[in-house]
Image (cartoon, rainbow, N blue to C red):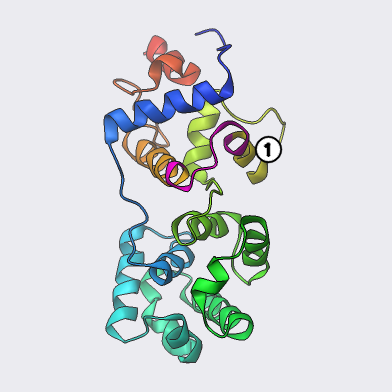
Amino acid sequence: MPKATTKPMAARLMDVYERFYAVYGPQHWWPGDGPFEVIAGAILTQSAAWTNVEMALGKMKGAGCWSLDAVHKIPEEELAELVRSSGYFNAKARKLKAFAAHVADNYQGDLDVFLAKPLEPLREELLSIHGIGEETADDIMVYAANQPSFVIDTYTRRIMDRIGMAPDSPNPRYADYQTIFHNNLPQEPQLYNEFHALWDRHAKEACTKTPVCEGCCLVDICPMGQGLISDS
């Protein structure tokens, strides 16, 4: 088992980023064409595979429901049918319409004006909208509003826990993980964009639920990985 590292957290994070980037290259996230598609995708991808979200987005586009105004005007039942492939379709239709209503009621439907708000007020307002939790809010912040608010998801937590970079807390919360990034990385949206995508890529390629440690680009700094390899 390797000894705990004494490198500062900022250096450790950038080391992980550079290893990921060397192996996987740029990820070109978010897979969307403009802020509306990013927002719709961020809501629909909750508890859903992206392939199923793409089907739902395709149905919305094909039906001409391809703007916040269109989402605001379409009956909820019709919207639910369009997004059926994403799962929990009735709940997601309500969430999409709640977002559209918020922008319509408070910003005369102008999404650009809403997304141009300063970081902290924008994130707080996003969290006040029905169906927008922390992860979805940060997806919107980074990929639609180009604001530096690091996205924490199941994949990021899994890898951080395994490589010994989890928050020093018995029951760490979303904000505890996010603070590690905010306190140790430059506040650069493009860095946050790329790094989040790379955590997800690595979790799907190597650090799966049952990890594939042999050949992993982090194995020499991962206590769990080195333990598994030595036991095999």
Q: Is residue 209 left or right of residue 101?
A: left
Residue 150 in the image, given as x and y percentages of width and height: 54, 46
Q: Residues within 10 Å of mark 1 (few under 14, many from 20)?
A: few
In the image, residue 203 sits, relative to residue 33, either above or below, namely above
The residue that appears at 36% across and 36% down in the rendered structure is 202
**Does residue 180 lie above or below 145 as drawn?**
above
- Residue 36: percent from the left, percent from the top? 42, 72
Q: Nearer the viewer, residue 28 or 54?
A: 28
Task: Identify the image quadrant of the C terminus.
Answer: top left
Q: Is residue 149 above or below residue 74?
A: above
Magenta stretch encompasses residue 183: yes
Q: What stretch is highlighted in magenta?
A: 181-191
Across and down, in percent, residue 113 comes to 54, 73
Looking at the image, can residue 224 be seen?
Answer: yes
Q: Return the residue nearer the eye: 49 or 10.
A: 10
The answer to whether residue 153 is left or right of residue 119 is left
| Above or below for 36 versus 77 | above
Tag 1 residue? 172
Verify whether residue 200 appears in magenta.
no
Determine the main secondary structure of the stretch shown in magenta.
helix
| Amino acid type, label 1 | Pro
Give the residue at x 35% y 52%.
29
Percent position (x, y) of residue 163?
A: 50, 24
